[in-house]
Image (cartoon, rainbow, N blue to C red):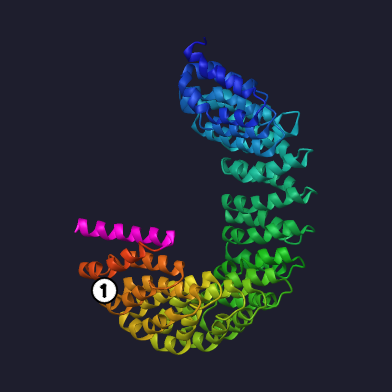
Amino acid sequence: MIDEPLYPIAVLIDELKNEDIQLRLNSIRRLSTIARALGEERTRKELIPFLSENNDDDDEVLLAMAEELGVFIPYVGGVEYANVLLPPLETLCTVEETCVRDKAVESLCRIGAQMREQDLVESFIPLVKRLAAGEWFTARVSSCGLFHIAYPSAPEALKTELRAIYSQLCQDDMPMVRRSAATNLGKFAATVEAPHLKVDIMSMFDDLTQYDQDSVRLLAVEGCAALGKLLEPQDCVAHILPVMVNFSQDKSWRVRYMVANQLFELCEAVGPEPTRLDLVPAYVRLLRDNEAEVRIAAAGKVTKFCRILNPELAIQHILPCVKELSTDSSQYVRSALASVIMGMAPALGKDATIDQLLPIFLSLLKDEFPDVRLNIISKLDQVNQVIGIDLLSQSLLPAIVELAEDRHWRVRLAIIEYIPLLASQLGVGFFDDKLGALCMQWLKDKVYSIRDAAANNVKRLAEEFGPDWAMQHIVPQVLDMINNPHYLYRMTILHAISLLASVMGSDVTCSKLLPVVINASKDRVPNIKFNVAKVLQSLIPIVDQSVLEKTIRPCLVELSEDPDVDVRFFASQALQSIDHVIMSS
C-alpha cells in the first residue's frame, strides 16, 4: 500500500509514462491539483525536479506543461521560491517546436515579472545568458524574448554585458535568431536608458535593417514605429526616417507591405514637417505600388493619413491616388478603400467631399464586387455629417434603392440594417416616399436572414417614428401579409407582430394584432401553430389579465391538445407562463 501523501506523485509518474497521450495530457493539466495535494515543500523538492527530467517527446504535452508552470508560483511557496520553476522552463525553451518555446518564454516572462530583484540577478539573468550562448539556435531564439525582463534589474556592469549579448544575437548566423531579435527589439529598447538607446540599440537596428533576408527586414520595420516613439523627434528623423523611406522602395513586397502598415505611426513620432517632406511621397509610392497586397495595406490607412495632413495637402497628394484606387484592377484593393474612404469626408471638408469624393462613392456603390458595395453602405453616416441629408438623398439614395434589390443577400442585409439610421436622418416624409415600400417587400424575401432582419427593421421604424405613424403605415400592411399562401412568410409576419406589440402598446395589440394571431392558430401547418403559441407567450406581459383569461388561455388550451408534439410543448409552456403571472399578481 502506497503512503497517502506519495500517492499523487506516483500516479503522476505512472500517467506521464503512459503510452496514451490523452492520459499524459490530463495529468499535466492537473498539475496544480497535484501540487496542492503534495504541499509547497514537496512540490519544490519532488514535483518540479521530476518535471525538469521529464523528457516527453509530444509537443502537446510540453505545451500544456509550459502553460501550467507559468502560474505555479503560489504552489511552490510564493515569490521567494519562484526560481525553482526556472529549470524546467529553461529546458522547454530549447525544444524544436515553436509554439512550445513561445509558451515557455511567455511563462518565464510572467514569473520574472514577479521575482525579487536579487533572485533575478542570481537566477534569471544567468538563465538568459545561458540561452543566448546556446549551441542550438532554438535556445538563442528563446533568449531574445527575455531580455526586457532581465535588463531593468541588472547592475550596471551586467547591463553592458546584456546589451553586448543582444547585439551579437542581432548579428547571428541563423536567420531565425535575427528574426526573434528583430521582433523583440522594441520591447528591449523600452527598458534601455536614453544614452544607450541612441548608440547601442540604433546600431543593432542598423544591423537588422541591412540583412539580406526579407523576413528579418520586415520585422525590423515593425521595430521602426516602436523605436520612433522612444526617441526624441529629431533623433527619430535622423535615424529612423531614412530607413523607413528606404524600406518603402525595398525590393521585397513583404517589406513594403509592412511599411504601408506602419508608416502612419511613424508620422506621429517625427512631426508634421518631416511627414510632409518625406513620408507623404513614400506613402504615395505605396498607394501606387505594383503589388496588390501593398496597395491594400496602404489603402486601409488613407483616412488616418488624411486626418494628420492639412486638407490642401490631402487633396493635392492623396486624393489623386484614391481616384486611381477606386478603379483598381484588384477587387480587394477597392474593398479596402471602400471600408475607409467615408472617413475622409470629415478630414477634407464639405466642398472637397461634394466635388471630389461623392463621384468616387457613387462609382464604388455600383462596383461589381458585393464587398465593395457593402463597405460603402456601412459608413454612409460619416458622409451625411459633412454634406447634409439633402445632397445625400439626391446623389446616394437612388444607388441605395438599387442595392436594396441586390442579387447578393448580404448586400440587402446591410441595407436593411442601415435603414433605421437612414430613416432618422431623412425624416418621416422622405422615408414614406422612397423607402416605405421596400421595407414591406423585404418581409417576403427568399432568404430567411433578410426576412428576420426585415421584421426587426419594422419594429425599429415603429420606435423611430412612433406608434401613430406605425398604425397608419406599417401595421395594416403587415397584417395583410398573414394570408400569404407560403407558410414561411406567414411565420415571418407572426415574428413581426410579436416585435411590434411591445412598441404599439396594449390597446392596439388587443384590438388589431391579437385577433390575427388567434386566427392563425387555426392554420393547417404545425410550424405556424407552435409559433402562434410562442407569440402568445410573448404577449402575456403586454395585455391585461382579463384578455389573458378570455382570449389567450382558451386558444392555448386548444393548441395544447393538438396532434403535433411541438405545438403541444410550446402551448403548455405558454400556459405555465400565464399561471405564473396570475399567481405572482
Horizontal arrangement in the rendering, residue 278 relative to residue 43 (left or right): right
Magenta-colored stretch includes residue 186: no
Magenta-colored stretch includes residue 573: yes
Displayed quadrant of residue 153: top right
Q: Which residues are magenta?
A: 563-585
* Residue at the image point whose x is 42% and y is 73% from the top: 523
Name above or below for residue 103 compared with residue 575: above
Horizontal arrangement in the rendering, residue 43 relative to residue 318 (left or right): left
Query: Could you tell me which quadrant the C terminus lies in?
Result: bottom left
Name above or below for residue 166 compared with residue 585: above
Name above or below for residue 318 compared with residue 107: below
The tally of labels here is: 1
Residue 118 in sight in this render: yes
* Residue at the image point whose x is 57% and y is 30% from the top: 26
Q: In the image shown, does 471 or 46 lie closer to the viewer?
A: 471
* Circle 1: residue type: Ser
The residue wearing badge 1 is 506
Q: In the image shown, does 467 or 269 lie closer to the viewer?
A: 467
Residue 278 in sight in this render: no
* Residue at the image point whose x is 46% and y is 79% from the top: 422
